[in-house]
Amino acid sequence: MSTPASTTSRFTTRLLADGREILYVDEAGTPERTAEDLRPVEPRVQSGELRHDALVDDWVAVAAHRQHRTFMPPKDECPLCPAGHGSVPSEIPEGDYQVVVFENRFPSYAVTSVGADAPDPRGIFGTRPAVGRCEVVCFTSDHEASFKDLPVERVRTVIDTWAQRTEALGAIPEVEHVFVFENRGREIGVTLPHPHGQIYAYPYLPDRTKALLDAARRHHGRTGRLLGADILAAEQADGSRVVVSGTHWTAYVPFAARWPVEVHLAPHRDVPDLVALDDDERDELAVIYRDLLGRLDRYYVTEDGSPVKLPYIAAWQQAPAKTGRDVSRLHLQLMSVLRGPGRLKFLAGSESGVGGWVNDVAPERAAARLREVAP
């Protein structure tokens, strides 16, 4: 593995009133972060339990406390704005910030869990603690911004943050997989409009992660090569679905795209995760990723010619923390449920019932549109 890239960002860890960690990530020259969380101390929320779905051999986190989490508050009640910027106490004690990471107040997985190991002698109703970690990553203190609005230097700081958290969370003994993602838009299920993402550290391999790993292992067993590298090479050779290509990264609409708008962004070098990216790769990623997000917001226009703010999920598919790292290859999956202005793709009978995906948009057409809307 290559040496992780160096960074000039400063990482400062503090504690919130209930004992949760908060991590400030600042560019060089920023004043020290010393503000204390003056909110009354409340009991820290524990995660629920994992229940084994024997029908498909998978796990489901049962976290009933999440029903009470904050839902789409007005701007002056946003808990992600800096302290003093609204009418309710903030999760972030400082009066301003650049990038902030903190433990989720309503976690699906946490360092403490009310669940317990309960093997079922029938092999049907097994449970285990939902031990892991859920973190919130705030990209900016500006409530009205989007990720694409960040300066390139700030995007690079976010990338360094993702890498640092991937390494730290992956080292936790119980953690099997670290998933870095951003949800944007009410249509996706966002509950806070402030620009932010999340990181989930799972104590098991989620279903898609298992599927990616299984396919990678089969391909490597047959060919001795990495599946991700061969897919990238094939997309580059075909060219019809390539959106943008740089020195270190290529973005393309996958041949078998499932979503109306879906783009994969892959490094040219074989790396398992964000941690392994070097300085040059991180620098170019900051530019290309920001470019792609801008194109998403120009992809659709209304009848009067106004651009549509596209809801999306940005999902980093990384190698598992402790297995399969020799065959796994990093890539970003950008996807949207919007199949036209005001029209959603619903995961209806075929998709939800049996997992049989149907895409109404030809991947080549989607790629051509994404090239059209270049800045």
Image (tube, grey):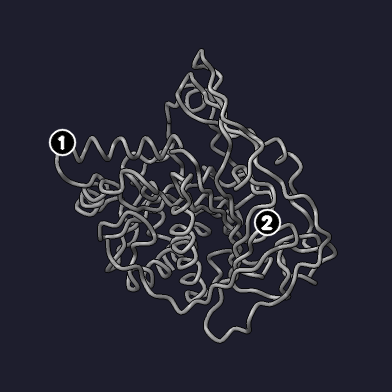
> Mark 2: which secondary structure?
loop
Please provide percent x and percent y for residue 74: 79, 57
> Mark 1: which secondary structure?
helix
Which quadrant would the N terminus be assigned to in this image?
Answer: bottom left
- Cα–Cα span, label 1 and label 2: 46 Å
How many numbered marks are there?
Answer: 2
Callout 2, which amino acid? Answer: Pro
Q: Which residue is mark 2?
A: 193
Q: Is residue 181 left or right of residue 233?
A: right
How dense is the environment of label 2, judged by Cα within 10 Å: few (below 14), some, or many (20 and up)? Answer: many
Residue 316: assigned label? none
Please provide percent x and percent y for residue 326: 26, 48
Instruction: Kindly give the residue lying farthest to the top in the view shown.
Output: 122
Callout 1, which amino acid? Answer: Arg
Near-viewer residue (262 or 222): 222
Q: Is residue 74 left or right of residue 346?
A: right
Residue 222: assigned label? 1
Please provide percent x and percent y for residue 316: 43, 52
Write the residue at 27% across / 48% down: 228
